[in-house]
Image: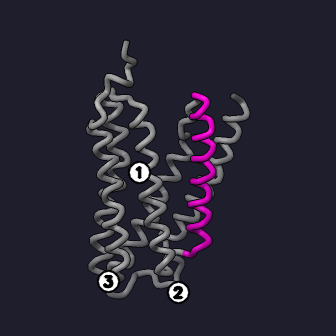
Amino acid sequence: MKTQDEKVHLWTLPTGLSFARILSVPLICFLISLEENRFFLISFFLFVFAGITDGLDGFFARRLKINSKFGVYIDPVADKMLVASCLITLSYYRIVPLWLTLLHVLREFFVNGLRGLYASEGVTIFPGRSAKFKTALQILGISLILFNRSFPEPIFQQGIYPEPGLIVLIIALFFGLYSAAEYLFTIKKS
């Protein structure tokens, strides 16, 4: 007898949106690497599109009542690939401070390690509101940075005014650390 999860086809609209997000990552990073405002603008639009697919895949999964273990796995992987790759690329070109990128990426490794450990024991730990808010803030922060660089002279130049995108990424880091603590407390209770 098949379980409910086995009845769901691998290629659904929600998983297709997650894969679109994954496939956009190399192109966005390549466009950032060109370091020209017109390419920053294109990367901004692609990144915003990828960020929107993050919300849409969950919406369609709930709306169409499509639940699968693969979907639960691929959605956060796509988010982390998108955010971490863009942050690393932006740090490489000295747009985002390296310390900020390292803290965001290390948090993701830590939380995914915890989730993977407990998944191997059959326990699924779902992200809480603070983790979802963290991801939304990361997407907003990176979008603001890319948009700011899309002008011949950035609106917020480093050293003159604090760049809003960096401020949003710092706030996202606080939510990320809080949600990591939530994961630890959830695990302690189980």
Magenta stretch contains residue 104: yes
Give me the residue at 45% from left, 49% from top.
77
Q: Amino acid at mark 2?
A: Ile
Residue 131 on image: x %, y %: 55, 47
Q: Is residue 69 above or below residue 83?
A: above
The quarter of the picture where residue 144 lies is bottom left
Q: Is residue 142 above or below residue 21?
A: below
User: What residue range appears in magenta?
Assistant: 97-122
The quarter of the picture where residue 6 lies is top left
Between 181 and 120, the residue placed more toward the observer is 120
Which residue corresponds to mark 1? Answer: 78
Q: Amino acid at mark 1?
A: Ala
Residue 49 on image: x %, y %: 30, 57
Q: Amino acid at mark 3?
A: Glu
Spatial CA distance of label 2 from label 1 is: 34 Å
Q: Residues within 10 Å of mark 3 (few under 14, many from 20)?
A: some
Which residue corresponds to mark 3? Answer: 36
Residue 3 on image: x %, y %: 39, 18
Which residue corresponds to mark 2? Answer: 160
Spatial CA distance of label 2 from label 3 is: 21 Å
As drawn, the label of residue 23 is: none
